[in-house]
Amino acid sequence: MTPRHLQHSARPVVTFTGAEDNVLVADLDGPLDGQPVVLLHGGGQTRHSWARAFDELVARGYRVLSLDCRGHGDSQWSPCGDYSLDALVADLRRVLASLSRPAVLVGASLGGVTALIAQGEDPQLARALILVDVAPQLEFDGVDHIVNFMTAHTAGFASLEDVAAAVAAYNPTRPRPTDHQGLRKNVRLAEDGRFYWHWDPRLMEGDHRGRTRDISRRMLAAAAHVKVPTLLVRGKQSDVVSLEGAEHLRRHLPHLQLVDIEGAGHMVAGDKNDAFNGAIITFLQQQSQ
């Protein structure tokens, strides 16, 4: 781990070397002897999507690492455009190998896919697993909703107000912030003066429905080998993971705990952060008893 200062982070920042010798950037804070907790964001997000959960976990005494996965946020874009599951899993293994002891993995959406597959393919990798609104049985309408949002603004935005409008259109039930400055962590200002999402557009290349089917098959195969305590936190109003999809995972992973967060959609931590934090902290405390 290499210390690094970045303009958009008020927390201690470190860098790791990924599987392609690519630079991975993370926030890292909490007591050195605390239980490591690694936060893995969803596709198209950055490590800052965990901001309130990060602070709450640090305050509770956990050693918290929130990672920008390759091609996202401040982490390096893949030199060859490789955003495959194999690449994401290999990066995660590199990061976890640098920690002093096994971590608890917390993964939302794509981060949850990565965490489940990594754990299933290496059952000794982590101490526990928290999946946030992701399961092998995914609803295609919800996946389409995400893909359409991520691919709708390839020409960028003229202002942060336009960024806020796009986010509000994607998730109209979430209260719209009056201060748009927080959105700067989710976009990059290009030389043409326009704002673009803070991820590599090559991430969205290819047949997303075929990719979703491949992800589902690989997640299901991995689930059969996951023996560590596992929690699924589902947004009760999610259009990506249905209650049927959650129960489908539990049939293949019988020790799975399930928490439904009322009033939350796919973006659980952002929609109902206090309820989300309460669910994961209760689970983490169970593991320390």
Image (tube, rainbow, N blue to C red):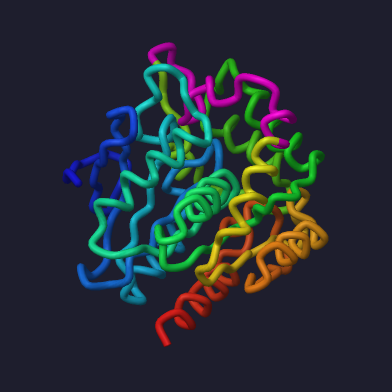
Establish if 190 lies above or below 266: above
Residue 6: give x, y in percent of width and height.
25, 39
Establish if 257 lies above or below 70: below
- Left or right: where 112 falls relative to 170: left
Q: Residue 36's quadrant in the figure? A: bottom left
Q: Residue at x 30, y 66 (%)?
A: 63
| Between 82 and 282, the one nearer to me in the picture | 82
What quarter of the picture does the C terminus occupy? bottom left
Q: Residue at x 28, y 55 (%)?
A: 28
Residue 203: give x, y in percent of width and height.
54, 26
Q: Residue at x 27, y 66 (%)?
A: 30
- Left or right: where 91 falls relative to 21: right
Establish if 179 lies above or below 51: above
Report if residue 204 lies within the magenta region: yes
Tell me the magenta residue range: 191-213
Establish if 269 lies above or below 183: below
Q: Residue furthest left?
A: 3
Residue 93: give x, y in percent of width and height.
37, 46
How many badges with numbers are in the image? Answer: 0
Q: Residue 78's quadrant in the figure? A: top left
- Left or right: where 41 falls relative to 151: left
Report if residue 97 lies within the magenta region: no
Residue 107: give x, y in percent of width and height.
52, 54
Q: Residue at x 50, y 50 (%)?
A: 121
